[in-house]
Image (cartoon, grey):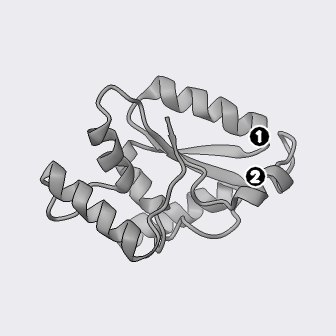
Amino acid sequence: MVDATNPWGEADAAAVEAARAELGDHAGELSTSESLAARLPGVHVVKTLNHIGYHDVEEHGRDHGDPSRRAIALAADDDRAAELVTALLHRLGYEPVHLGALAAGRDLEPGEALFSGWFTSAELDLRRAEQVRAA
């Protein structure tokens, strides 16, 4: 399952907090995608496409090898699910960058460094490295 969602506003924040409370995550240690995965046992969740506007998906895909091809990050605990989504992102015209486990999806949530902006895969890797150094 591709999780392309973002919590926006008070209603979404309340829903996220209720889901975390249900899971016993009172410190908010789980990313929203991890919370979703915990509520859907057996479903392989991949966090991606939440840091690109829906209209950009159709309009800004580029051929493989194009130096301006935009990177789209993904995070997943299941390698096979990540491979399938990687193939989908390539078909859509984007350069997939696998961040690692689903917990890394927190870096793709609103307010985080990788959430907004247009990055090539090299730029996204650099931004992520800067974020790790700052932490």
Of residues 106 and 68, which is closer to you in this image?
Answer: 106
Name the spot of residue 118 as percent of width and height, x first: 70, 66
Up-down relation of residue 42 to residue 11 (above or below): above
- Which corner quadrant holds the C terminus? bottom left
Kindly state the secondary structure of the residue where label 1 is placed: helix
Residue in the foreground of this view, choosing between 85 and 97: 85
Question: What residue is at 50 percent from the left and 61 percent from the top?
Answer: 128
Q: Quadrant of residue 100?
A: top left
How many marks on residues? 2
Q: Is residue 29 visible?
A: no
- Say the numbered circle drawn on residue 57: 2
Are dots 1 and 2 in contact, CB under 8 Å?
yes
Q: Residue at x 50, y 28 (%)?
A: 81
Residue 117 seen:
yes
Residue nearer the viewer, 21 or 75: 21
Label 2's element?
helix
Q: Is residue 56 left or right of residue 108?
A: right
Circle 1 packing at 10 Å, graded few (<14), some (14-19), many (20+), is some
Q: Amino acid at mark 1?
A: Leu
User: Residue 58, position in %: x, y?
Assistant: 81, 50
Residue drawn at point x = 25 percent, y = 64 percent: 17
Residue 6 shown left or right of residue 27 in the figure = right
Residue labelled with disc 1: 92
Q: Amino acid at mark 2?
A: Val
- Residue at 48% x, 69% y is 110
